[in-house]
Image: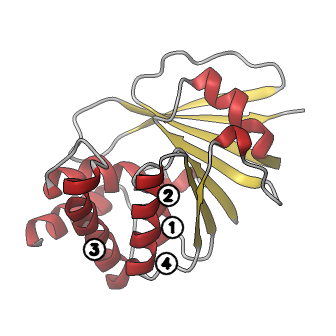
Amino acid sequence: METCKKSLLTGLEALDISIDDQQVTQLLAFVQLLEKWNKAYNLTAIRNKEAMIGLHILDSLAVAPYVQGPRIIDIGTGAGLPGIPLAIYYPSMHFTLLDSNAKKTRFVQQAILELGLKNVTVCHIRVEQYQPEFNFDTVITRAFASLPDIIELTTRLLSEQGILLAMKGQATDIPELDGAQTTIIPIHVPDVDAERCLVKIQLTK
């Protein structure tokens, strides 16, 4: 894991993200859990621990400056991305990780237990059926659906000043929305040679 740790620390420095030793340990432990469970559960197409640092951990943390709390929901979290890395980075915020795939939510629940995360709740449900008691300051999603579908399914979950953050590759299918302000934020992920952007949507009425 020494190579992974070096890649992680170099990447965090490039992102200008500062974390303590415990958070570094938690992020590396999460990568080890991903690799271990991936063999049986097929959680991610990325098999290599070193590749997971860039494509999963740094990719998730690259959007950290744009997240607003205290209540965040990660829709279609899959293997806990970006929710678990963000929850490690922001221990004072509360994260709800939602996915309809039972195998993946079982993994996420186990990862939360093993990593000792007290600020994460897992929901095994389809987003269409989800009825939260309180709405969220940030709805975040990574490759969950097309942007128009994401908007249709998730904006009802936003608090009055809440924002929707959609992590995308290329900035395509960005609709012009009445009653919403849309901002496209280019994202550079260290060690990832692919285009990334964050689509930020804030309702204006």
Residue type at mark 1 is Ala
Query: Would you say residue 200 is visible in this rendering?
Result: yes
Q: Residues within 10 Å of mark 4 (few under 14, many from 20)?
A: some
Instruction: Determine the CA span between mark 4 and mark 3.
Output: 12 Å
The residue that appears at 84% across and 25% down in the rendered structure is 179
Query: Would you say residue 53 is visible in this rendering?
Result: no
Q: Nearer the viewer, residue 1 or 184?
A: 1
Mark 3 vs 2, N-terminal side: 3
Mark 2 vs 4, N-terminal side: 2
Q: Tag on residue 83? A: 2
Instruction: Determine the CA span between mark 2 and mark 1.
Output: 6 Å
Residue type at mark 4 is Leu
Q: Residues within 10 Å of mark 3 (few under 14, many from 20)?
A: some
Instruction: Between label 1 and label 3, give the one nearer the viewer.
Output: 3
Disc 3 on helix, strand or loop? helix
Q: Tag on residue 139? A: none
Residue pointed to by mark 4: 117
Disc 1 on helix, strand or loop? helix
**Residue 77, horizontal then vertical, whole percent:** 49, 50
Question: Would you say the residues marked 2 and 1 are in contact, meaning their CB atoms lie under 8 Å apart?
Answer: yes
**Residue 47, horizontal then vertical, whole percent:** 16, 49
Residue pointed to by mark 1: 87
Quarter occupied by the C terminus: top right
Residue pointed to by mark 3: 29
- Residue lying farthest to the left in this orientation: 3
Quarter occupied by the N terminus: bottom left
Instruction: Determine the CA span between mark 4 and mark 1.
Output: 8 Å
Taking the image as shown, residue 17 lies to the left or right of residue 90, namely left
Mark 1 vs 3, N-terminal side: 3
Residue type at mark 3 is Ala
Disc 2 on helix, strand or loop? helix
